[in-house]
Image (spheres, grey):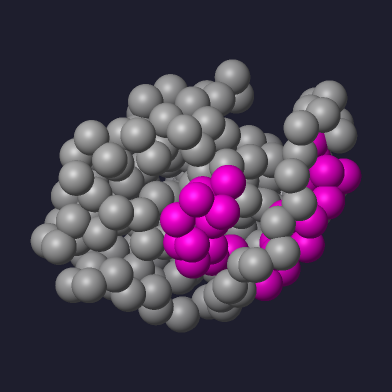
Amino acid sequence: MRVYKMPELSAYAANCYAVVSERKNAAVIDAPCRADIILSTLLKNGESLKKVLLTHGHFDHIMAAAKLYEKTGAEVFIHKLDAPKLKSSYLSAADFFGITDFTPFYNEKTVSDGDVITLDEVSFKVLHTPGHTSGGVCYITKNIIFSGDTLFELSVGRCDMPDGNASALSDSLRRLSQLDGDYKIYTGHGAPTELSFEKKYNPYLRQA
């Protein structure tokens, strides 16, 4: 399994990661925008896109999903509670930020807590972590957590937008803090971090 970050795609600095199997089949974690760059990067590496795993339904994490599906037929996964955001510029918060090129998407596959998504030898476990949105999730594979906007380095996702819930986020952070072992955390914005570091220094995780 190989994991790498895509080039900067979005003015909102949302991260996009590729997870590549031994057979060079790829899943991308979040699809901020610029499907052309995502696909050209994969093509340059001889990799084929098979799955798109969305951590939540805000516009800055989903805008390329429709084009990626159109170009490759890749399966697009999102938690069932955030699926309506794929179809609405309002629910996805695109309207709040003046985004005018929102493309609705209707061909998603929905996931729930505990589901497992398989890509060849790679398995992603779905951990439902509401708070930033009601359908926010983390994807866990081996010793890696893709945390979306649930957990950042020394911070967390905001809860003051529609569908945010600070109490739910606190519960989600508690679930993360109770995971056994250590994990590399690839966040939805900003730099990667380690769960052990966040348990020790992140004030939100410590409080939870």
Q: Along the line of sight, which residue is nearer the eye, 109 or 80?
A: 109
- Comparing 126 with 196, the one in front is 126
Q: Residue at x 19, y 39 (%)?
A: 45
Please give the count of numbered marks on the rendered protein: 0
165 with respect to 35 (left or right): right
- Residue 115's x, y, as percent? 46, 80
Q: Does 204 appear above or below 208?
A: above
| Residue at 62 percent of width and 67 percent of height | 108
Say which quarter of the image contains residue 179: bottom left
Residue 83: in sight, yes or no? yes
Percent from the top left, x then y, of residue 130?
64, 60
On screen, residue 110 versus residue 182, left or right, reads right
Q: Which image quadrant: the N terminus? A: bottom left
Residue situated furthest left in the rendering: 22
Report the side of 50 relative to 152 (left or right).
left
Vertical comparison of 140 with 203: above or below:
below
Magenta range: 67-94
Q: Is residue 171 above or below residue 59?
A: below
Task: From the top left corner, tell me how far across and down residue 100 is, in percent.
Answer: 82, 29
Q: Position of residue 32 (x, y in %)?
A: 55, 37
Q: Per the image, is 145 magenta?
A: no
Tell me if I can see residue 148 in this picture: no
Q: Which residue is pictured at 28% across the width and 40% down the height?
A: 43
Q: Residue furthest front?
A: 71
Q: Is residue 76 magenta?
A: yes
